[in-house]
Image (spheres, coloured by chain):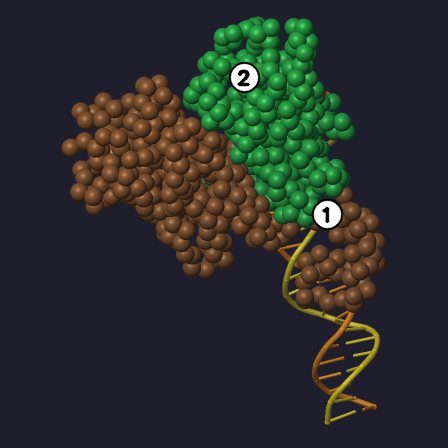
Chain colours: A green, B brown, C orange, D yellow
Amino acid sequence: MATQRDVARAAGVSLAVVSAVVNGTSHTRMKESTRTRVLRAMQELGYQPNQTARSLRLNQTDMIAMILNKLDNPVYGPLRHGVYEAAAEHGATVLLGDAETMRSGSQFLTRLLSQGTVDGILIRGEGLLDDDVMAELRSHPKPILILEHALDHPWIDVDDRRAGEIATRFLVNLSHRHIVFVGGSGYLSQQRYLGYQQAMDAAGLTPAPHLATGFGEQAGADGLRQAMQAATAPTAIVVNNIMSAVGVLAAARDLGIAIPDQLSVVGIHDVDLMQHLRPAVTAVRMPMYQLGRAGVEALYDLIAGRPSAGGVITDPEPELVIRDSATAPTRIRD
Amino acid sequence: MATQRDVARAAGVSLAVVSAVVNGTSHTRMKESTRTRVLRAMQELGYQPNQTARSLRLNQTDMIAMILNKLDNPVYGPLRHGVYEAAAEHGATVLLGDAETMRSGSQFLTRLLSQGTVDGILIRGEGLLDDDVMAELRSHPKPILILEHALDHPWIDVDDRRAGEIATRFLVNLSHRHIVFVGGSGYLSQQRYLGYQQAMDAAGLTPAPHLATGFGEQAGADGLRQAMQAATAPTAIVVNNIMSAVGVLAAARDLGIAIPDQLSVVGIHDVDLMQHLRPAVTAVRMPMYQLGRAGVEALYDLIAGRPSAGGVITDPEPELVIRDSATAPTRIRD
DNA sequence: CCTTGTTGACGTAACGTTAATTCAAAATAG
DNA sequence: CTATTTTGAATTAACGTTACGTCAACAAGG
């Protein structure tokens, strides 16, 4: 394909001029007439800039990587949108990777670690990455931003504690007294449980222990079964994540527990699916889109060597979306 | 960071030797002792190859793009796995893009069109791409493979017609007589409807018209409502896609239609979610993982200039997964 | 002892860009 | 009319790799 050299020849100008036309560089000046001549030559030859040569010269690829711990998880939809959009505004493209396949020596990791692949890395699911993988990544010369609470890295996250609190307080206000928390593993789940505890404490109720059954539909089903085995069965549960909520609904159906009449359910994280389940699930919507955008901005701050604003995103707060899966308990016990 | 030049200096050898060590080139030979000396120098300096320079030199980026029409769609999970795996085996990384954001002039498209970005392109959802976008892509010097039936491009696809046939025949064999097809738009949906028609014809039943309500949960709900307005209500429906099936279940619940007692439902495409819905959905599993692998292989055939095996994948056939959403009709009419 | 072959390595020209430097010609100032 | 500035452009040196061509040293063959 045509290169700048070909265009220069066709337009009867030097390489420098073509480059200046392509980039709009102010350093090399030219008459408007030569500019249009170059432009026409580019048009005729179908010139397309060579991204690779550009990257080599500039030591910048206009590409950032995002590593998620489960690409399939629908909660990442809005996150991805935010990231793609903000990246596009920075002229960058996003390389998506799954934490599951990030083993030491894997293709994707090797690629990431080599120079000139990406300008920066966004990671959600740091906990799922092996320590040696994280160590290798840490040696990467380009900045890394964690989309989650992190100790030894710049990070940014949504307010998981608050989400747990909001979900729980809603149930408390509906006058539920026996509320359990069906959770997963990891820091996120702990934070949400913390919020649950705080809301329970504030209401003078005793928090139940964290039923950490893991992640996904099966985890939700397991969690519900465990919860129902307690001495006094709960009248409401807060479910740590959205896929677990699907499992809770299924298990409730299988166990003959009517939702919301016998058991109220509030999920954390909201996705389209929640409104299409029956009963439609009341859930706490997290600002994942904004997390994506804010993550990219923070990463570009790091890339540019500017101080980066991290921490918990509080501007759009987690927001309760009331649907049909939670109601006041029919019989209020003790 | 360290370059081959630095390594060469540290190991007291020439650039050529370092390059040979990195690539295992046979042209430039060396003693085992020098090889290990170079290796040690690389280790000490933390040398990482520069992917950009390599790409420029070789005119090959070891990256392929995959464009999907809705990244969120869970049916793409296995497809993505297949593609990522097969790509990794070819030493390549996958750049994921959404057809929705592929407008003329968009960041991602511009990036794709510039030289030295990817070695080839995989597209599913060609129909959703604007004609001018496709025209621009067609001018791309690197090969393009469509993961769908296509007229003017190499293509490869799963057997959608067969899936429609399998779903319908299953219902016919359960002795349903009034079966409708709730479909979407586009070629895929047409193919599935065609399979439906064939199965109906084969059973001596008259096919109902294609209820093409679109894509997603709402489409399923709309489809069901339309279907139930017919003079003689159907006893079974084949749902074009999995997200629509969710909508059908919800709408049935809202309308007080019991599934499967009053209405049997079979979905096309199977995802984890289907087994966690209540009732669990009987669905036709499509070999999407294999499609992903086969797509990458076919693309690399094109890249290497080899003849590429395209067409419909028949080796793993679409397979019916029987769950709880379909049963024999309680009353067989006419 | 000369010829030929092999081993082990080195030098260097690209790949396509960008940006610093240089420079002739034209325009303006004094 | 000369001195100086501005305009419009050309030359060229990187960026880090890879692979072609070259070549000295040494070994083996006749």
For the view shown, which residue lies furthest in the front direction? A231
* Numbered tag placed on residue B48 in the rendering: 1
Residue B201, quarter of the rendered image = top left
Q: Residue A188, position in %: x, y? A: 66, 24
Residue A128, quarter of the rendered image = top right
- For label 2, the residue is A266
Label 1: few (<14), some or many (≥20) within 10 Å? many
Q: Inspect the image, locate mark 2, and give the three-letter code of the amino acid beneath it.
A: Val
Residue ID at (55%, 48%):
B85
* Numbered tag placed on residue B192 in the rendering: none
Q: Judging from the image, what secondary structure is the residue with disc 2 in?
A: strand
Image quadrant in which the N terminus of chain B is located: top right
Residue ID at (47%, 56%):
B301
Label 2: few (<14), some or many (≥20) within 10 Å? many
Q: Inspect the image, locate mark 1, and give the three-letter code of the amino acid beneath it.
A: Gln
Image quadrant in which the C terminus of chain B is located: top left
Residue ID at (64%, 15%):
A196
Q: Judging from the image, what secondary structure is the residue with disc 1 in?
A: loop
Marks counted in the figure total: 2
Q: Is residue B38 left or right of residue A62?
A: right
Q: Residue C25, position in %: x, y? A: 61, 38
A213, above or below A37, in the image: above
